[in-house]
Image (spheres, rainbow, N blue to C red):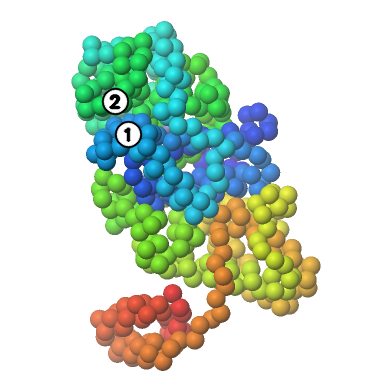
Amino acid sequence: MLLHDTLTRTDRPLHPLDGKTLRIYCCGPTVYGPAHIGNFRTFVVQDVFRRTVELGGTPTLHVRNITDVDDKTIRDSQKAGQTLGSFTAEWTAKFHADCEALNLLRPHVEPSAVAHIPHQIAMIEKLMASGHAYKAEDGSVYFKVGAFHEYGALSHLEKREIRLGAAQTDSDEYSKESMADFALWKARKDEDGVNFWASPWGEGRPGWHLECSAMILEYLGTEFDLHSGGVDLIFPHHENEIAQSCCSTGGKFASHWFHIAHLMVDGGKMSKSLGNLFTLADLQAKGYTAAEVRYVLISGHYRAPLNFTFHTLDSARQALQKLAKHEASLRAKYGAGGAPKYDDLIRHGSAGVFADAWALLTNDLNVPGALGAVFGAIKDADSTAFDVETAKSRWMDLHFVLGALGVILPEAQPDAEAPAEVVALAEQRWAAKQSKDWAAADKFRDELAALGWTTKDSKTEYKLIPL
Ligand code: AMP
Ligand code: ZN
């Protein structure tokens, strides 16, 4: 498989360093509220990546952390009048429920930051001993960015940009020697309440960047295959992880960097601080399914920002119906039961007639290209003309590709007949369109959509399609 690598800016093949298992680390959620579907774009794309690697025949070791101690979790647990532990446990459980609904494979290891404070302290001790860290007057400990010459290699930032970026992200830290230095240990502050731990430098808590470095060392060792997150993590978070890990272990850290572009709303990044977010629950309350949300999240290439609209959800519903109908027609011919299990697909090990889709998927995870190839291959395939053996192998091949994408098919619905009221509206819209009365045509289109219908127009006629 070829995958773009953020560090070298090239598409590089993936081969496990140990010759057996691809060892992957993904930065996990900060559990201080519901994860939004922007966060889930990153987690779902990582899931498609893992599935593609595994179905391609390489086992993985997938580690994804839970950030359950940082400024935001502490602040919001206090606002909620809960202990940090009970507050983050509730949001972690909600995160897991959403992951399950979105058909994400569970990571093999899901370590919690708060359960690894001794590991983080041990890493700071090494950095102090090697001269890469210093203690400030208030008892905080900082990483000395100037002592690590490769700093900035991942994000390709110049020194000045690093200083400016760091000034924006860590504006509350005045006691450090240089603007670019970042906190490894934050001295206890009154506003942290009871959320502090003992350390050789006094009471306090670890800086946010440190947890990933410490847990990677514990579960994946000094060198591992692939590190991933959303593009916002490249700087400073991943740059800081590299600095901490390389300077404390002497290892090379991640050999491949995989970053996912943002989910956008109206041209801006979907984020909690901008208040423009949708959660899975928000969309389910509007009648959409988790399978439809997942389909939208994978439908754009992971390296390009993806604009979220309700129109894309409606299109996802139609696309899933097309796939479900084709699957049902193969199943009818073949006489099979439910969908094959993931392990059966790993044993099957081939995309067969969907080889074109598979080639696109394994070439820098081109999911939209792969979906297009699947639709191309099923467009003119008449299942009734297949013999049982052909139907059976095509059915398995289809599930193989859908298994890599983690697509869950809905029940195939028979083509619905439009009620008279809908046909009348469609006729009025068509007449308005013919007389170039666009405002009226749009109004009728909205009314049709409200009734769950849309139309597909050619030059001479229209076809009614259920949404
Ligand atoms: P957080 O819970 O804020 O630590 O973020 C969890 C993951 O979601 C990280 O990998 C972020 O980079 C990613 N992320 C945050 N916002 C978005 C977005 N709008 N689109 C895609 N990924 C995002
Ligand atoms: Zn991280």
* Residue 441 falls left or right of residue 387: left
Picture residue at 33% right of the left edge, 31% below the top: 70
Give the quarter of the image for residue 149: top left
Picture quadrant of residue 71:
top left
State the SS at label 2.
loop
- Image spot of residue 389 (x, y percent): 79, 67
Residue type indicated by callout 2: Val
Q: Which residue is mark 2?
A: 194
Quarter placement of the C terminus: bottom left
Q: Nearer the viewer, residue 385 or 204?
A: 204
Where 86 falls versus 97 (above or below)? Answer: above
Q: Position of residue 207 (x, y in %)?
A: 34, 25
Given contact means CB atoms under 8 Å apart, are the residues at marks 2 and 1 in contact? yes
Distance between the alpha carbons at the discs numbered 2 and 1: 9 Å
2 or 1: tag closer to the N-terminus: 1
Q: Residue 344, relative to residue 255: is it above or below?
A: below
Q: Is residue 443 above or below residue 286?
A: below
Residue 320 rendering spot, x and y as whole percentages: 53, 67
Figure quadrant of the N terminus: top right
**Residue occupying the point 35% across, 16% down:** 198
User: Is residue 353 visible to the viewer in this orientation of the structure?
Assistant: no
Residue 83 is tagged as: 1
Residue type marked 1: Thr
> Which quarter of the picture shows residue 225?
top right
Q: What residue appears at the point 51 percent right and 51 percent down from the top-left corner?
A: 100
Instruction: Categorize mark 1 by other alpha carbons within 10 Å: few (<14), some (14-19), many (20+).
Output: some
Q: Relative to 385, is 273 above or below?
A: above
Q: Secondary structure at mark 1?
A: loop
